[in-house]
Amino acid sequence: MQAFTIHQGLVVPIDRENVDTDAIIPKQFLKSIRRSGFGPNLFDEWRYLDHGEPGQDPATRKPNPDFVLNQPRYQGASIMLARKNFGCGSSREHAPWAIEQYGVRAVIAPSFADIFFNNSFKTGLLPIVLPESEVSKLFDEVYAFVGYQLTVDLPRQRVIKPDGTELPFEITAFRKDCLVGGLDEIGLTLQKSDKIRAFEAERLARMPWLAHRIL
């Protein structure tokens, strides 16, 4: 998992409430058995005018020129601004995977659906909750200024606006440490690999029959 410390990036606005996970990554893309390659299909039904299926070449698709991700001013955005209850609906892990694989490192919203919020941390995506009034001001500023960027300082738990204004946000110490260290659940487990190997060696010494296979 990619570590997250301080990130500065262009902001893309997703100006809709109650964006559900089927909108974020439509159901047909869940057939993939891989955990990668979902970025091109982020918001697929809003982003393209034709129906998408797994494995299609995005270059052959018909992009929707009115959708925000297809507008030139937001190309290369790595911070997403959203309205309340972002990520509601079904509990698909593919939703934060698609956002992160598109290139977004943080999503800022007044509120998130619980399962999406928890899944985001597991893939290195930082969901940031700010007051609705502050989020509305950010939307106004994003629309007003082409190339609008924010800085997310995770160690200090601050979103920093271009004028230097700092917006504090909350995150649990455990989740913060995992993101700063780039550690998912597997990475956390591997930190104890020496103890795991020692335990397995000691157990095998006491119960050598465990090494035998039943044919």
Image (cartoon, rainbow, N blue to C red):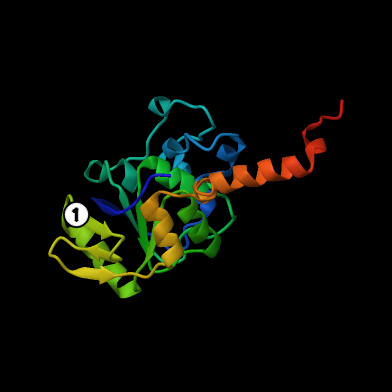
Quadrant hosting residue 26: top right
Q: Where does the C terminus fall, quadrant-wise?
A: top right
Residue tagged by mark 1?
A: 148
Above or below — where is 34 with respect to 113? Answer: above
Residue situated furthest right in the rendering: 215
Could you tell me the amino acid type at mark 1? Tyr
Residue situated furthest left in the rendering: 163
Name the spot of residue 168 as percent of width and height, x first: 29, 71
Residue under the image location 60 percent in, 34 percent down? 33
Left or right, residue 7 beside residue 93? left
Of residue 8 and residue 74, the one placed in the foreground of this image is 8
Q: Determine if residue 88 is in view.
A: yes
Above or below — where is 187 with respect to 169? Answer: above
Residue under the image location 51 percent in, 34 percent down? 52
Residue under the image location 49 percent in, 52 percent down? 122
Of residue 94 and residue 204, the one placed in the foreground of this image is 204
Q: Secondary structure at mark 1?
A: loop
Decide: few, some or many residues near mark 1? Use Cα within 10 Å; few <14, some 14-19, many ≥20. Answer: some
Of residue 125 and residue 208, the one placed in the foreground of this image is 208
Name the spot of residue 123 as percent of width and height, x first: 47, 48
Left or right, residue 27 beside residue 17? right
Name the spot of residue 116 as percent of width and height, x first: 51, 57
Q: Determine if residue 46 is in view.
A: no
Name the spot of residue 2 as percent of width and height, x first: 38, 44
Of residue 35 and residue 57, the one placed in the foreground of this image is 35
Q: Where does the N terminus fall, quadrant-wise?
A: top left
Residue under the image location 48 percent in, 60 percent down? 117
